[in-house]
Image (cartoon, rainbow, N blue to C red):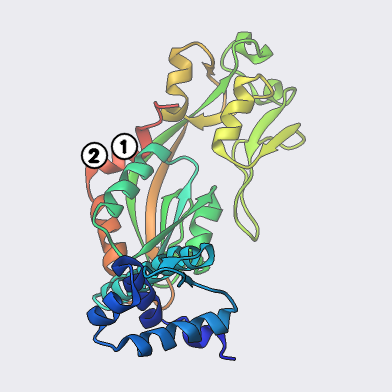
Amino acid sequence: MQNPRDVLTPDSLTMLQVIAEAGSFAAAARQLGLVPSALTYRVRQIEDALDVLLFDRSARQARPTEAGAELLREGTRVLQEIDAVAHRVRRVATGWEPQLTLSVDGAISPHTMMELVDAFYAMAPPTRLKLRDGIMTGTLEALTSGRADLAIGVTIAGSSVAGLQQAPLGDVLFIYVVAPHHPLANEPEPITDATLLQHRAVAVADSALRGGATMGLLGGQDVLTVDTMQAKVRAQLRGLGGGFLPEPMVRPYLEAGRLVARKVARPERLVRVNYAWGGPGFTAPGRALQWWLNQLQSPATRRALLENHHHF
C-alpha cells in the first residue's frame, strides 16, 4: 500500500476536484485527456492509500462520499496555500522580507500603529508582520539583540551600537497624575519628594531581558509594578498609586476629571522619543522596512504616533 503522502499530490488533488465538478469519471477523463480506466486507477490508488472510499460509484454520477467531501475541502485549502506560498516566494525574491518585526514602546499610540499596519497590508505585501511590546530600554534591546527589525518609541540612547541608526519622532512631556480621590490630589504644590515617598508609586516594568531601567521612582518607596502602560493608567485611575505618564496618553482622562495633574518639586520630564533600525551586520533595508521608514518621515505620522491616544 502506498503512503498517503505519495498519492496526495497537488496533481491528484486537482484531479479529484475535476471529477467532483464534472460529476462523472467519464466527463472528468475527457477534461483531463485520460481514458476512464486510467482515471479510475488513479482514484483507487488514493483510496487504497487512505483506506477510504472517496466517490460513490453506485450510480452513473460520481458523488463524493463524506470522506471524499472532506478531502475535497482540505484539498482546496492546501492548493490555495501552495499558490500563496509560490506567490510569497516570488515576491520575496523581489526584495520583500519574509517577516518584519517591530518593537513598539508602550508610549506609542496603538491606534496609529494599527492604521499603519492596515495601510501596509493594503499593498498586499508578502511580508508577515510581528509586533512586539516594548518598555523603556527593552524597546531598543529587541532591535540590538536581533529580535526586531525596527524599534518605535526609543527613549534610551543607543549610539554605542555599531550600525544603529536613529531618527526623532518628537518630544513627549511626562506629567505626574493621580486619581481625584487619591490623597495627593489635594496636597499643596509643588509636592516634595518627602511627601511622594509616603505614597505608593505605580511603575511599568522595563521589558529588557537584561538589566533595565527605572524612571521617576524614589529609593524606599512602595511600588506597584505592572507590565504595560495601559495597566499603569488603569491602576492610577483606581487610585492605587501615583506616577508619571505621557501627557497625550492621559489627556482625555484629565479632561474628564478622572485624573488630575499635580506639580512636583523635581524638574519637568520632557523626553525625546526616537525610532531606530539597523545594528550589527545591517546592510540595507528591504522593501518592507523601507516602507515603514518612509511612513516615519512624515511629520503628521510622527505626531500621531505620540499624540493619538484619544480613542478608548
- Left or right, 8 with respect to 300, comes to right
x and y percent of residue 214 in the render? Answer: 62, 44
Local secondary structure at mark 2: helix
Q: CA distance from mark 2 to mark 1?
A: 6 Å
Q: Give the residue at mark 2.
A: 300
As displayed, is residue 145 above or below residue 117?
Answer: below
Q: Give the residue at mark 1.
A: 304
**Residue 200 picture quarter:** top right
- Three-letter amino acid code of the residue under disc 2: Ala
Name the one closer to the observer, 154 or 258. Answer: 258
* Whether residue 135 can be seen here: yes
Residue in the picture at 69% in, 23% down: 240
- Left or right, 159 with respect to 180, comes to left
- Left or right, 96 with respect to 101, comes to left
As displayed, is residue 183 above or below residue 37?
Answer: above
x and y percent of residue 216 in the render? Answer: 60, 36
Name the one closer to the observer, 23 or 292. Answer: 23
Instruction: Name the quarter where the C terminus is drawn.
Output: top left
x and y percent of residue 201 in the render? Answer: 68, 29
Residue in the picture at 59% in, 91% down: 1
Residue in the picture at 50% in, 63% down: 70
Question: CB of mark 2 within 8 Å of CB of mark 1?
Answer: yes
* Whether residue 109 can be seen here: no
Name the one closer to the observer, 10 or 271. Answer: 10
